[in-house]
Image (cartoon, grey):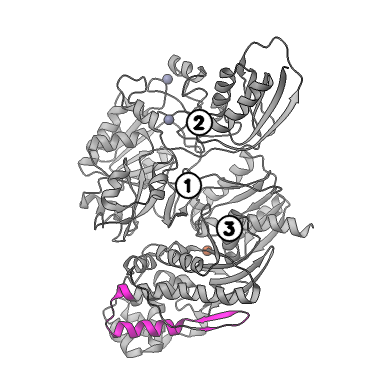
Amino acid sequence: MIKRKRYTFKGLVQGVGFRPFIFKIAKELNLVGFVKNIGIGVTAEFQGDEKQFIELNEKIHKLKPENAIIESIQIEDIETIENEKEFKIEASSHDQIDTIIPHDMAICSDCINEFFDNKNRHYQNFFISCTNCGPRYTMIKKLPYDRENTTMDKFKFCKECEDEYFSPADRRFNAQSTTCEKCGPRYYGFSFEENNEIKFSRNIEYIDFLSKKILEGKIVALKGIGGFHLIANPYDDNVVERLMTSKKRESKPMALICKDIEDVKEICYVSKYEENLFNSNISPIILFSKKKDIFNNVSDNLNTLGIMRAYTATYYYLLRKTNLKFLIATSANISKVPMIIDQNEALEKLKGISDILIWHDREIYRRCDDSVVSFVNDKNIIIRSGRGYAPTYKRLEKADKIIAFGAQEKNSISIAHKNNIISSQFIGDLDSKENIEYYEKTINDYINLFSFEPEISISDKHPQYYSTQYAKDFAKTYNTKIYYLQHHVAHIYSVMLEKNIEKCIGFAFDGTGYGDDGNIWGSEGFIIDKINYKRVFHIDYYNLIGGEKAIKEPIRLAYYYASKIDPLFTQRYFANSKYSNILEFIIKGANIVDYPLTSSMGRLFDIVGTLLNVGETNKYEAMIPMHLESIAEKSEKGYYETIIKFSHTSILDIMQIIQNIIDDIKNGIDKSIISAKFHNTITKIVVDITKYLKQNYNISTVVLSGGVFQNRFLLERTLNELNNHGFNVYINEVYPINDGGISAGQVYYGYLFKKYSEE
Ligand code: ZN
Ligand code: ZN
Ligand code: FE
C-alpha cells in the first residue's frame, strides 16, 4: 500500500548538506515527494510503500552527513498525492525561525585535493568550499540559511558553479558558500612600505606575493574567515620581535599554523585526542606541550605552543609556497580592541604594524576569533570559544526567553530560546569603547537573528561591570525581570548546564568576582542544590595591597606578605627589584584597611610566582601563574602542610603556605620543586575539603571551574585525585572554563529559577 509521510527534522540540519542527502536517498529508493528548509529545520514529504520507508529510515540514521546533528524527527501520515513523478528540492519557506546556525568549518580533504589538482575546475580556487566545509556563522545575515541571506549574495554564479549547485549528485549541491575563481571573491592589496595599492589580475598572484614578502621577513595582514590575521615567519627572530612589540602585545604568546599533525609531532607531544581535534573541521588553536626548546620567542618561553591546522585553501597554499612548516598566524588587533574584520579599518589601524595588507571582498558579517583549547587527559578545556564552536548550542527542554549578559572579562552572551541554550562567540573585555560596541552589536544581532523575545535577564552581581549596567538598562527597555547571580556560582552552573547537574559540590577558583558580602571572592567552595547555594569554603580574607594595581604588579602582595613573615629576608631577596623604592613604602606606608579584602586564588598564584622570581609584573593576563605552572616539576609528589579551619564555612590560611615556601627558598630547594609542591598543596586542599563536605552533605558529585583551572598541572592532579577518592568530577568541556563561560552559567540559573519557582 502506498503511503505519504511528512518528516520534520530539527537540530543542526541547515548548511551541512542535509537536503542533498535526503534528496539522494529518496532518489535511490525511488520515493517521490520533496524536501525543503523551513524556519525550524528541514521538512520532507515522501511517498512510497512500507519497504521503501523501512530502508529510508535506516539510511537516514546510517548515512547522515558528517556535520549534521539530528535532534529530533517528527513523522506524520498525510494524504497521498497522485501523479507525482519525482523527488524535488523545493525553495525554503520563510515561516517561524528557530533553527540551529552552523559554525564555520575548516576546509575538508576533498576540497584540499581539488585545490591542488591542476585538472580540476577548482584548481587554485582560494575560496573553495562545499557542503562539508567553509564559512557559515560569519557569513549568515539572517535565517533561513539560503544564498541570498548570506554575504555570498553579491557573487552571482557562473555557469559551472550554477550547474554544481543545482546538480543533486554534486558535492556542492545547494552549498551556499560555494564559488570559483571565475565568479567568486577577489583579493585586493595595499603596501604600507611603498604606500600604494597592490594590483594583480589573479588571486594567486596576491598570495604568491604574500609568500615572497613573508620570506623577506615582512609582517603581512590577511583577511580570512572571521577576521584579519597577522602572518610572519616564526623562524625569523627579527620579525618575531617586531611583531611582539608592534602589536603592543608585550610578549603575549602567539599562535602558529601548519598543515600536518606530523609536523606538530616533531616538536610537541600529541595525544590521540589532540590529533582528532586538530584534524577536525573545528581545527582550533590547541595548546600542545613542547617536546623540545623551540619557538621560545613566539611562546614567551612557556612550555606550551598554540598551534592550529590550516583551515582555508589560502593557508595550505601559503605553507607550501613558503616551504615553511609553521607560520605565525595571530589575530590582527591592537590589545584590548576586537579583531579587525573590515579593510578600511585595517588600512587605518594596521599601519605601522603590518607591512603588507591583503583582503578579499566577501564581507565578514560576524566577527569570530580562532578558538583556543587545551587538553587534560581525554578532556578538552575551552580557553576561547570562537571559530568552529560558536554559536554553541545545548538542547534543554522548556528553556526559553532568558538572556544572560556574562561578565566584564572575556565576555560572551547566552540566550535560552525555544528549548535551546545558544551561546555567543568570545567578545572580549568590556573596558574599551570598541569592545563595548561589539558587545552591544552581538546582543542586538542575537535578538534579530533568532527573533528572540526576552522575558528574564540575568546579570553578574558586580555593580561596576559594564555588563551589569547594560543588563539593567536592557531590562527596563525590554520590560524583563532581572536577577543578579554571584560570579563564582555562575562558574559552577556553567558545568552543571553541560552535564545536566542540579546538585553538587563546586569549586570556583579564579582571579576576582564580586562576592555576596561585597568583598572580592576568588577561591570559593559551594554546595549548590537547584537554585540554592551555600558558600562552604574560601581562603581567609587578605588585603589586596595596592588595590587594582596588585593585579598587574603582584610584587606588592608578595613583598608585603613575605615581609610579615621575614622582613630581613624579604628585603635582601627583592633588593634588585625595579620596584624596590615603592616596596619599602608599601611596608611603612600601607594603611592596610584602605585595601579591599579578597579570597582570590589567582592572586595567591601571583604571590607564589613572584616569590619564585618567574616575573614581577603580569605583562599580560595570568603571565606569572602561567610561568609558575610551566616550571613545575611533574615527578614531584610532595606538598606543604596547611592550616584549614574546618567548619560550616571552612577557611584556609595562606600565611602558612607562604611561610613554607620561604623556608624552602632559604634552604635552596629548586624552584621547579617548590612550584610543584605548591600546586600539589592546592589539590590536597580541594580533596580534603571535598571529603569533609561529603561527610556532612552526602554529595559525591564535584564540579571544578574558573580561570585558575586553566592551569593544566593543577587541573589534572585535582581531577585524578578526586577520581581516586571515588568522587564523580566534572569540568567545563563545552563552555569556557574562564569568564567566557559565565553567561552559560547565568542562563542555566535563570532556567532553574523559572522551573523551581513556578512549581
Ligand atoms: Zn569541502
Ligand atoms: Zn563560478
Ligand atoms: Fe571568573
Q: Where are the magenta residues, as a range? A: 644-673
User: Disc 3 versus disc 1: distance between alpha carbons?
Assistant: 17 Å
Q: Which residue is mark 1?
A: 386
- The earlier-in-sequence mark between 3 and 1 is 1
Left or right, residue 172 beside residue 394 = left
Q: Quadrant of ligand 2?
A: top left
Q: Residue 419 at what x, y percent from top left?
A: 68, 45
Identify residue type, mark 2: Thr
Identify residue type, mark 3: Ser
Identify residue type, mark 1: Gly
Q: Which residue is mark 2?
A: 151
Dot 3 beta carbon under 8 Å from ligand 3:
no
Left or right, residue 504 beside residue 456 = left
Nearer to us in this view, 743 or 212: 743
Of badges 2 and 3, the one in the foreground is 3
- The earlier-in-sequence mark between 2 and 1 is 2
In the picture, the quarter occupied by the C terminus is bottom right
In the picture, the quarter occupied by the N terminus is top right
Can you say whether 521 is above or below 315 in the image? Answer: below
Whether pointer 3 and pointer 1 mark residues with C-beta atoms closer than 8 Å, the reply is: no
Q: Residue 463 at what x, y percent from top left?
A: 61, 66
Of badges 2 and 1, the one in the foreground is 1
Nearer to us in this view, 524 or 478: 524
Q: Please check the rendered image and state whether residue 295 is part of the magenta-colored stretch, yes or no.
A: no
User: Disc 2 versus disc 1: distance between alpha carbons?
Assistant: 19 Å
User: Disc 2 versus disc 3: distance between alpha carbons?
Assistant: 33 Å
Check residue 494 in the rendering and tell me which mark sits there, or answer none: 3
Q: Please check the rendered image and state whether residue 657 is part of the magenta-colored stretch, yes or no.
A: yes
**Crowding near the residue tagged with mark 3, few <14, some 14–19, many ≥20 C-alpha atoms within 10 Å:** many
Whether pointer 2 and pointer 3 mark residues with C-beta atoms closer than 8 Å, the reply is: no
